[in-house]
Amino acid sequence: MDYDVVVAGGGPVGLMLGCELRLGGARVAVLERRTEVDPTIKGGAITTPGAEALYRRGMLPAMAEVQRQAVDRFRAFIREHNGGNGDEGGGAPAGQGLGIVGHFAGIMLRADLVDRTEPGLGDAGPASEIAFVAQQDIERLLGERAKELGVDVRRGVELTGFDADERAVTVRSGHGDVRAGWLVGCDGGRSTVRKLAGFEFPGTEPEITCHQAVVEMTGAEDLKVGWTATDTGVYAHGPMPGRIVTVEFDGPPADRDAPVTAEDLQARLRRVCGVDVTVTGVRTATRFTDHARQVTEYRRGRVLLAGDAAHVHSAFGSQGLSLGIGDAMNLGWKLAAVVGGRAPQGLLDTYTRERHPVGAQVLDWTRSQVAAMRPDPRSRALREIVSDLAGTVAGTTYLTARLNGGGVRYELAGAHPLTGRSAPDLELAGAGRLAGHLHAGRALLLDLADDPGLRALAAGYAGRVDTLTARCPSRPKLAAVLVRPDGFTAWAADAGAPVPAAGLAEALREWFAVPEGAVTPG
């Protein structure tokens, strides 16, 4: 074998997966057809689960700096648009910076209306303060991390085909063949891997045409900042100078790959917003629709999919980037364990079982946003109701939790409320925060009750499960937590729980036992 795993696609999802596989000891190559990061405008934000995943790998300071620069640019944009006298969002929470936590169908969700006691909204630690980090910045940061970890990232190399059998996959490209044990398609919504492998890809057809661009224009003084619904569609202006989005409900484009011209953008912007702006130049532009599709399974033999290769949807709500990073986090440690002989191939079945429902939920939430954007009277009536709900604590909290993805819970064995959820970023006495102990990508038994019996169980999984004994004053009833490498809780127990060791032993066997008859490296 040339590699244990070949990853097709070197965007954020492919790079994240490459890093996770490398942390797990796998030899991995990432093949990316582009020679540089794609400068085309894409997602400008990341939801908490994605930020949380990167935080758990030590990337919080870099993300925080990128966000600081983005917020500074937005405040400068507001000052310029309002003649230097506008609200800059200075009273917003430090992390969000702008007083908002996102939007549903262009209906802005205010940070001060979010109840942070809701599961998944108040326990992510500093990651919950990260939002305004663009996709290109995430890709750049992950590229640097991949280089540090020794991931073989081959730019300018495009997968053109492959042959798979029961033992390996031979990947073909214009630069020769590569043989690996596994192939993962992270090659986007038009995935070559998905098509060649024969994955079923059902879903719904598009009904809208969207354009997103950064342009040079005159006459934009009358454009409202943020999202605005009109009689002909929806448009957005900001949060940077020249950034515009138009949403039109006249069906999909006749040619999605046709160049996006200044004349076309100008005509569409005038039609939707009713303002006679003049577009004099286009810095970057893209066109997208709302077709929503998802493969029925994420694995076929030795070929797997992650990110947009497995599910496509509209960009509303900035959920796609975090969804793909979540796929990579879930798959990475499992595939690395199989490659390293630390787990049977059956562990990979949990990848589809856990991530498919999460992807299906995101598809439905993007579809629902399109329904609330339509300009017909029924949809506008629905939009008014949603807007009213978004003006309440309960409504904003519900919408934020679902859009943010922080309420994800995998169906795992165990009755504890934390089981199956993303582990809270506990603040530990004298030992920092929990995320700081997950940088190496291994599982962690956090012993909060100084229980030598629990630590003895974990000691049988040395090299796969780390242990840490500490106290957590904010959670005095919590006795122990077993955190998987992806940051999700495999098992937890409260003080005084009956026979906690039995539940821990079962969870350790389920997730980290070496398959019978296997010979592990070393």
Image (tube, grey):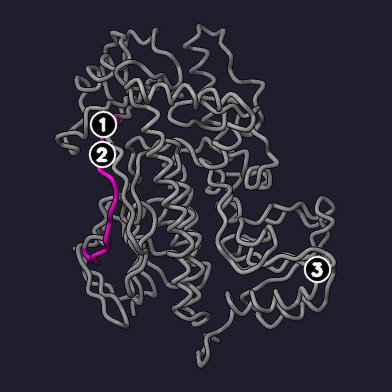
Q: Position of residue 503 (x, y in %)?
A: 70, 74
CA neighbours of label 2 inside 10 A, class few (<14), some (14 to 19), many (20+): some
- Determine the secondary structure under disc 1: strand
Residue on which the image places disc 3: 497
Image point 80% across, 72% down: which residue?
A: 498
Magenta span: helix, strand or loop, mainly?
loop
Image point 43% across, 41% down: which residue?
A: 365
Q: Residue 122, which numbered label?
A: none
Question: The N terminus appears in which quarter of the rendering?
Answer: bottom left
- Determine the secondary structure under disc 3: loop
Q: In the image, is residue 209 part of the stretch drawn in magenta?
A: yes
Residue on which the image places disc 2: 206
Q: In the image, is residue 75 part of the stretch drawn in magenta?
A: no
Q: Residue 209, which numbered label?
A: 1
Image point 46% across, 24% down: which residue?
A: 239
Q: CA distance from mark 3 to mark 1?
A: 55 Å
Question: Looking at numbered disc 3 in the image, what kind of residue is underneath it?
Answer: Ala
Q: Position of residue 47 (x, y in %)?
A: 52, 42
- Viewer-side residue, 381 vs 363: 381
Magenta range is: 196-210
